[in-house]
Image: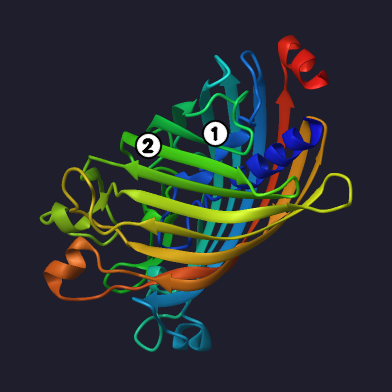
Amino acid sequence: MEKYTKILFATAVLTLAYINSYAQGCVAIRQFSGVGTTTGQVGGQLAGDWNLALNYRYFKSFRHFSGKEEHPHRVEQGTEVINKSHFVDLAVNYSFTDRFFGSLILPFVTHDRSSMYEHGGNPPNGLGERHHTSVSGIADMRLSANYWLISPAKAQHGNVSMGLGIKLPTGAYGAEGMFYNQGPDRNIDRIAVLDQSIQPGDGGVGATLDVQGFYMLSHSVVLSGSLFYLANPKATNGVLRRGGDAGTPEFDEFSVPDQYAVRIGATYMTPMPGISIYGGGRMECLTSTDLFGSSEGYRRPGYVISVEPGLTYSKGNFAALVSVPLAVERNRTKSFSDKIRDRHGDAAFADYMINVGLAWRIPSKTSEVFNSL
């Protein structure tokens, strides 16, 4: 029972770091910070148990794509947009019964964005001065209710949990910063709304679907998978992008887009006590078309497909991980306005992301008795 629980706990923590790609550069994939966090509810966890998790992520986006085509000249000319983003997610899970549990995910972000085009224009027609804008604060919080389809006591080889939740607009979505070399003569410094990709929130109330599962191939190998979808019915959040036209809100107000993520992989428990190795693949996407409501507004849709190696250490009720998803395919797809205007915008993506996760299970007295059997 002890090794079984440790395997599931290691798998849960790896799933916790799932993500949240959180924002893959200019494609503002935000809400995955909690993807998989619900599986911090380790198989075998009983009523009254708590699970706390802390996840940190970092990436630097700078490679520009339109569709799957990269624009290497942006880096060569020094005109690329660079986003450096840090994310810290606090997740709290509580088991109401052996199968039903709730999750609260509270994310914090820090973004730094540097560019030339926003501060006078790219050369040769612009001033060619690189400046920074930045923002820090709480992002959009998530609450969810989740249920194991099989009783953990009977799930000898695998299980699946399904969760429904709500995403709340707790993060700023109209944050402002200083922009240099503005105006007709490029001689004015002006405070204006920050780029959509570094806004902490999206300004909408969304519904989430979260499916997690695992299957034990042996006492040493566990397969796991996750599916997450955020549906945002709201079309736009009322914030006009910098330089946008107030007369065309369907094109220039910030959109509140749908997002989804898929992850699949395997965890191998090595002969070394507490050490496991993870390998898998993942895909994160900000959609160009929403499931519900209008898809109007300004957005940079796209997706990232990555391979993800990881390493986990677990001991007792504690686990820690490091994983580094490496991008193998990046695609800046066409948005609503791109299709209407017969154009194809670009976006900057990262080469890799760094995930570091910690998880701590706090068992109830009943669980302590159960695990001692």
The quadrant in which residue 28 appears is: bottom left
In the displayed structure image, the side of residue 93 where residue 231 appears, left or right? left
- Residue under the point 55% across and 24% down: 151
Residue to which mark 1 is pinned:
38
Dot 1 lies on which element?
helix
Q: Nearer the viewer, residue 270 or 243?
A: 270
Question: Which quadrant is home to the C terminus?
Answer: top right
Point out residue 327 in the picture as x, y percentages from the top left corner.
54, 69
In the displayed structure image, the side of residue 116 where residue 320 appears, left or right? right
Point out residue 2 in the picture as x, y percentages from the top left corner.
80, 31
Dot 2 lies on which element?
strand
Q: Nearer the viewer, residue 22 or 18?
A: 18
- Residue under the point 41% across and 85% down: 123
- Residue under the point 46% across and 80% down: 79
Q: Which mark is residue 371?
A: none
| Amino acid at pointer 2 | Thr
In the displayed structure image, the side of residue 341 where residue 63 appears, left or right? right
Q: Which mark is residue 208?
A: 2
Q: Nearer the viewer, residue 151 or 319?
A: 151
Mark 2 surroundings: few (<14), some (14-19) or many (≥20) residues within 10 A:
many
- Residue under the point 19% across and 61% down: 336
Q: Nearer the viewer, residue 303 or 256?
A: 303
| Amino acid at pointer 1 | Thr
Separation (CA) of disc 1 from disc 2: 12 Å
Protein image colouring: rainbow
Question: Most extreme residue toward the right, as rendered?
Answer: 272
